Amino acid sequence: MEQINIYSGKKAISRIVVAEGLQGLDACLKPYRHIYAVIDRNVAEKCPAVSRVMKMLEDRQARIRLVEASEESKTLETVMDICSWLLENNADRDALVLAVGGGIVTDMAGFASCIYKRGVRFAYMPTTLLSQVDASIGGKTGVNFHKYKNILGVIRQPEFTYLCPQVLESLPLRDFHSGVAEMLKTFVIEDGGNYQKAADLFFDISSEFTLEAHINGKDEGQVWKALMAKHKRTLAELIAAAARVKAGVVSRDQFERGERRKLNLGHTFAHAIETLAQQDGGERFNGHDGIQDVKGVTHGEAVAMGMVLAARLADRYYRSDRSETTELEAKISADFWDADVPCYCPYTPEEMAGIMKKDKKAEGGKVHFVLPKAIGDVETVDLTVEEVVALLK
């Protein structure tokens, strides 16, 4: 078990606990007398590890609220429902709200905790790889508004975040791939020798799954569970490494006034892609990349597409020769392909332009675009959306 701290100056203000199993969660909860758990209903029904967590919470006489987790339900209305439930169950200022689920649940429960009675304590147990390496770390909370991603929210750090790869055993394969994109994004920003290690692991997992489930015809669920058990230690090490990167950046720039902007690599494009997909029903994604017949786009898939576009934009921005795909764009695309993560964006820069202008990171008519120059070397450049569209033509 490893603990990683997030600091404000020299003071630790939040901790991240990384463990291979559930045994450390009970110790994390011990100091809190009144626990109110907000849990993704789907995860509660399908994840055996979360069933054990719920039993642990019931033994502690915690109140439990099951919620639907989807981009459509990630609204102020759902946050108000959580606040109403807290009020009806007499949650006081000494309450701890524990969010168990993916990034949608942690975002909503965290936001509700920040505004209920002007702020109560909260903690996270993320159940997706994406939320373990990104959404649950750093204190960003929020909801969608008028079809724009996370446009309402605050930054406030949780008491703790408990990261455990054991809960990934029942995670749908496509959702796992979303986390692959966020983890590789983290190591493009700060490598430390982890990018290639992660890319190799995800290639191995994808290859082994294809062999056992698709070629040998074994039960997909059993194959996936066995793969997660087999690679649990390496996965925990990489989750911890990604958490250390993000915790370090957040400690140096908690409120995103400078360095933390780097964590948005690919996200301005990604949020535009998600918004367009929601507006057109995701029809353009059927069979994209030739990998599988899928409809719509997940956040992680959109991030993968955004990273490829960011690499292309970096090439166009830093070099005058636009005739060939650069080595970096080719590598990132190939690594996503090997991990079975779709990364081809079906929307044109012109189609994304209007949405990118409304990005919450826009200031003074310009957007902070994060440009990867190499693995482990990124730079934030302020560009107008018009300049970006012209460079990507």
Image (cartoon, rainbow, N blue to C red):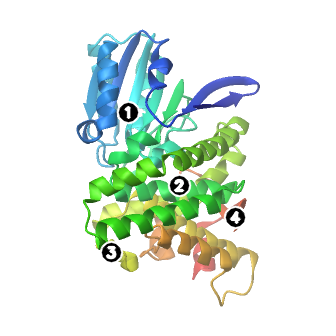
Q: Amino acid at mark 1?
A: Val
Chain-order first, disc 4 or disc 1: 1
Chain-order first, disc 1 or disc 2: 1
- What SS does tag 2 mark? helix
To which residue does mark 2 refer? Answer: 182
What is the quadrant of residue 300 in the picture?
bottom left
Q: Where does the image place residue 128, in percent across and percent down from the top left?
A: 41, 45
Real-space Cα distance between discs 4 and 1?
33 Å
- Which quadrant is home to the N terminus? top right
The reply to whether the C-beta atoms of the residues labelled 1 and 2 are less than 8 Å apart is: no
Real-space Cα distance between discs 4 and 2?
14 Å
Q: Residue at x 71, y 59 (%)?
A: 376
Closer to the observer: label 3 or label 2? 2
Number of residues whose C-alpha sits closer than 10 Å to that of mark 3, classed few (under 14), some (14–19) or many (20 or more): some
Q: Where does the image place residue 176, in percent across and percent down from the top left?
A: 41, 54
The reply to whether the C-beta atoms of the residues labelled 1 and 3 are less than 8 Å apart is: no
User: Tag on residue 284?
Assistant: 3
